Image: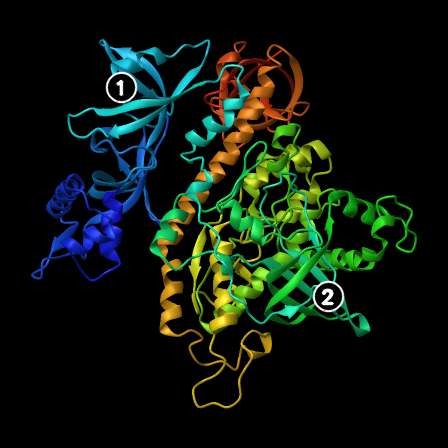
Amino acid sequence: MFTTSSIIDNLNQSEGLEYKKLCRSLKITKKSDKDKLDIALKALETLEIINKNEDDEYTCTKDSNHILAKIRCSSKGYCFAVRDKNKEDIYIKENLLNYAWNGDKVLVRIIKEGYRRRSPEGIVDCILERSNQILLSRVEIINNDIYAIPIDDRILSKIKLPKADKKYIYNQENKNIVKVEIDRFPIGQVEGLGHVIKELKLNDNEELDTDFVLSKSNIVKLGNENLIESKKIEKRERIDLSDKNSYLFKSWNSDNSPMLPMIQIEHGKNRNTKLWIHTNNLAERVELNTKKSLEIFFNSFESFPMLNNWQNYLSEAIRNTSKFNLGEKNEAISLCLHLNSDNEITEWSFNLTKVRCSLIVGNDHTEALLSRKSKTRITSRLLKPIKEFIEDLDKILEIANSFRQRHLLEGKVEIPSPLNKIDSLNEFYIHNPAEYSKGYFEPLKKEDCQTFLSPLLHEANLIWYKHSNQYGLKSAGYFSKELDYINANEIIKYSEFVGNELELNEDGNLSFSQVIRLCEDDDKKRILHKLLINEFQENEVSLISKNTYNDESEKLFISPWTIPGYDFINLINQYCIFNLITNGKKSKKNTINEINILESNSLKLVNWDIFNSSISKNIDTLFNNFVIDKFNEYKNKVSQYKSNMISIKKVRKAEKSLGNIYNGFILSVQSYGFFVEISELNVEGLVHVSTLNNDWYEYRSRQNLLIGRKSKNSYKVGDQIEVKIIKVDILKYQIDLELT
């Protein structure tokens, strides 16, 4: 089904489309769908968003006074249209939303300019794309009619249901939430219509948690029929390294977790080494050159953990033919790094290879290797069976540590991952070496072997940015918003954690790493880490091309390609590398000497277009802002899902401890109360100010505390207090506490 957004996207990608061509682009054949398209086109013309030229071609209006934005609503009823590029948000009154819901993509017109500290005000003229096709709702009877009332109080509409759905009326005891499919969105004076497709009785039924959280995050649970299938790869010349030892570092426990690359080491003279990174050759097996393929990816751009397994964005067939299995030969797309005796990278090259997995390295292996008192003695029962591999593994761990130390010296920051005390969430807390949206590193841990993959893959991904940028090739990746210093005013709020040995720079700022060092108590340090994480903004993927930024950009950009089984960005970057290897021009016409464009020493010698027009066109269909925006939208949903999945499991754990009393730390203070972490359970809850009935408490934002007017009792970040769990809300992931 087409959307208003898809109409505009198609018109934006052309200089003009006739009606028939537009129908073909939108895959519209039925008369009923054409009637709907006619209505949409007429409305867009009336709003002067599109126009029809003298050749009867539709085009987007240039210099339109409409602004593309997303609606963001709060539970208190405030609504804003959020613009890109850090522009000011536009305030939208509820009666001017025109039934736009939280998360919808819209076109907004400013009707009142902002002044002083007031935001500009606007009106929603057109809803381009709906974020919700399925609503989680309670069923209620209103004036003898059946309605779905969204549990998300940021959605300001109710949906009329058929009489048959009366059987799903909400029962507090069962917590029977329903999934409602929208048949017609509300418009003008016409009510929205829908029907119940599934009932979720959440009370004491944890098996439904995944379905509930996925639906709340607007993620569709995919079957294998919704995914791209594998294609046969062509026979190509490859470097045969299958007689060499290659190692797969794996901490994830699920059988269908994302495929990971292998590491191979070659020891040379004078402690020089070659480090090979062998990646699964998905770019050879996935059809990426058709519009149909892209449309399938729009349903799922990323793999993510569920409770017992993963939802993968690629089919089982592709994964089975591409993953590295112990003792089996596989085709790979590889990067060879040449390292000197100080483990510094001196040169590199990209290659097609044939490899074999010699050992799957687990957490028990890295723990045993790094716990030895002497490298010359092998006494561990875990190490004796792998005695022949130990020299290689020691060198790989050494290189990983060297790379990480250099990253930290360059100003990168390490923050440990939060503790986990809920077994069903283990896969969520294992380090993900493909995750680059956080903006900080997790420390290397011998108990998690995948942490040692990260420094190696980080360098490989930096190298692809450097290599592709030098050749003027497109790539997609993350721009690192570095955070070397944080404002001292923020630290003063957390003074209970860090003591008073503060040394500020001339701007009144404090080194990020210095803050962490000043905190000595382990419990407080762990809580401080949680607070400091909030200083980092989630990084989004952006398109990268030559001269996008200045010379410093090679330190700030990273173009991931080493784990293509994890997400679409790794896949398309690997696809570009694969085309560089197989289709890249080695020299100019009429030039006798070929240059090896796969090697680092060629970077300054190339002054021609690497790809011909056909290959460039294929790559442009993947590397464009429309696709990247879709990816970021999906990634935000996945991020929300992961956070919500952790939250609901913590609430489930607290639910079993209702009425119990625990010690806890105050994490943060707000005007309405303060949040407390119960370390024993590893859950957080709210002590609402209304429960502090022994005094009237005033919130002081500068000191970040609540203080009683009469008693002068205060509650501030870092205070240790005793609390009781009094209530939990599964639907809102909330835990309510009170002081004892």
Q: Please provide percent x and percent y for residue 632.
A: 42, 47
Q: Is residue 345 left or right of residue 130?
A: right
Residue nearest the viewer, comparing 280 with 673: 280
Residue 650, quarter of the rendered image: top right
Marking on residue 161: 1
Separation of marks 2 and 1 at Cα, in angstroms: 66 Å
Indicate the secondary structure of the residue bearing disc 2: loop
First-in-chain label (2 vs 1): 1
Could you tell me which quadrant the N terminus lies in?
A: top left
Rendered location of residue 232, percent (x, y): 50, 59
Left or right: where 556 falls relative to 249: left
- Residue 343 badge: 2
Q: Is residue 73 above or below residue 282?
A: above
**Which of 501 and 559 lies nearest the eye of the viewer?**
559
Q: Residue at position x 22%, y 39% from top?
A: 122
> Where is residue 268, by image quadrant?
bottom right
Q: Amino acid at mark 1?
A: Leu
> What amino acid type should be assigned to the residue bearing mark 2?
Asn
Residue 594 versus residue 320: which sits nearer the camera? 320
Q: Nearer the viewer, residue 697 or 727?
A: 727
Q: Position of residue 587 (x, y in %)?
A: 48, 83
Q: Is residue 114 visible from the viewing direction of this image?
A: no
Q: Position of residue 186 (x, y in %)?
A: 21, 28
Q: From the viewer's perspective, is 246 left or right of 595?
A: right
Q: How many C-alpha atoms fall within 10 Å of the one at disc 1: few (<14), some, or many (≥20)?
A: many
Q: Which mark is residue 18?
A: none
Which numbered disc, 2 or 1, marks the residue closer to the eye?
1
Question: Is residue 515 placed above or below 679 in the rendered structure?
Answer: below
Which residue is at 73% across, 49% downward? 361
